[in-house]
Image: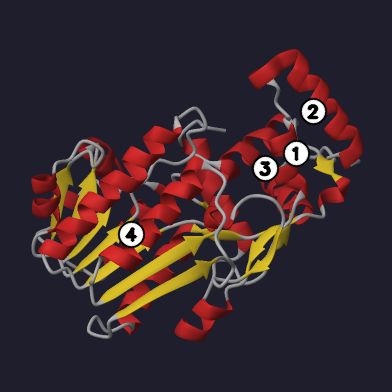
Amino acid sequence: MILITGANGLIGRALVAQYLTAETPLRLQVRDRAKLQKLFPDIEKQKQIQVVELDLGEASEADCVALSAACKTIIHTAALVHQPQAKPQEYERLNFEASAKLFQAAKKNAVKQIVFISTIAVYGSGSLRNVSEEHKPAPDTPYGMSKLKCETYLRHELSAPLIMIFRPALVFGEGDRGNMLSLLKQIKSGKYFHIDGGQALKSLIYADDLAKAIKVSLEKQKSDEGCYQTFNIANPQPISMYELSESINLLLRRKKRMLSFPASLMRMAASIGVRLLGSRCPLTPDRLDKLTQSTYVAVDKLQNELGALSFTPLKQSLQAEIDWATKEKLL
């Protein structure tokens, strides 16, 4: 049996969809059973599916032991993310402490395979170009710090036969509540513009492609190998902000051209805006850095391990998120 935590989330729901087609026995941890039933209306009618409504942030050790009992594999996706107002202590409690409790329960239950969804945020912010898994982590956000702490805990405190760490780039798709959805909203409202021609390169990964890669990875690995693996995961080719935003503009059927402004001018405007508006300023120096700095990772290690993976064409995956966001009245 496979336990998937955070089964209602962006990555979790994509994993559920992957495994449902294979009729694999699943135990799905969610905080809201009704939300899962809305996503997969007949899911609880399927004999191979168990749904556990549990808040991991409030779960006891006994809860975690029961949750992971009789499971061969745990795919741990549940995490606090995209909550800039959350205090560092919340990331520590929900991302690290809750995870450590689950990992210890997995140890007690002799779980053979643990997959942990980390993030490229462990490498830190700023310009990242073709960064490999050997790059020294230097997280500088509470989210990145909490994820790296989980990685370190798994490496030094657990002895499962197979531990796999995935560090995804920006994940998007149906269920997204993060940066891609924000970009879609800005472009649709006409508030987005290129900075320095949109030259910055970004790594992306569609949630369905991430789920597929995790499934294939587990099928190729033997749980008695006794290994700890860390993989970056993203589309093999990074995409420029210009190409990404223009593709979205086209898919949204907007006819207006997006203007481009020099970064020096926008940096001055951002500084003035923050002084006048504070946190209400739509363009901050930090956000400007994210838009103008290239952030992409090397994925050679994963490709060498798994061979050629098929990735969904960018426009098709973007259209899927647009259709979902429109249906949910988020656009």
In contact (CB < 8 Å): disc 3 and disc 1: no
Closer to the chain start, of discs 3 and 2, is 3
In this view, the mark in front (1 or 4): 4
In this view, the mark in front (4 or 3): 4
Q: Which residue is mark 1?
A: 288
The picture quadrant where one finds residue 186 is top right
Q: CA distance from mark 1 to mark 2?
A: 8 Å
Closer to the chain start, of discs 3 and 1, is 3
Q: Which residue is mark 4?
A: 153
Q: Which residue is mark 3?
A: 252
Query: Would you say 161 lies left or right of 284 here?
Result: left
In this view, the mark in front (4 or 2): 4
Q: Position of residue 209 (x, y in %)?
A: 47, 65
329 up-or-down from 40: above or below = above
Q: Which residue is mark 2?
A: 270
Residue found 82% across the figure and 37% down from its top: 256
> Callout 2: few (<14), some (14-19), or many (20+) C-alpha neighbours within 10 Å?
many
In contact (CB < 8 Å): disc 1 and disc 2: yes
Q: Report helix, strand or loop for mark 2.
A: helix
Amino acid on which the number 4 mark rests in the picture: Tyr
Amino acid on which the number 2 mark rests in the picture: Ala
22 up-or-down from 68: above or below = below
Q: Position of residue 105 (x, y in %)?
A: 15, 57
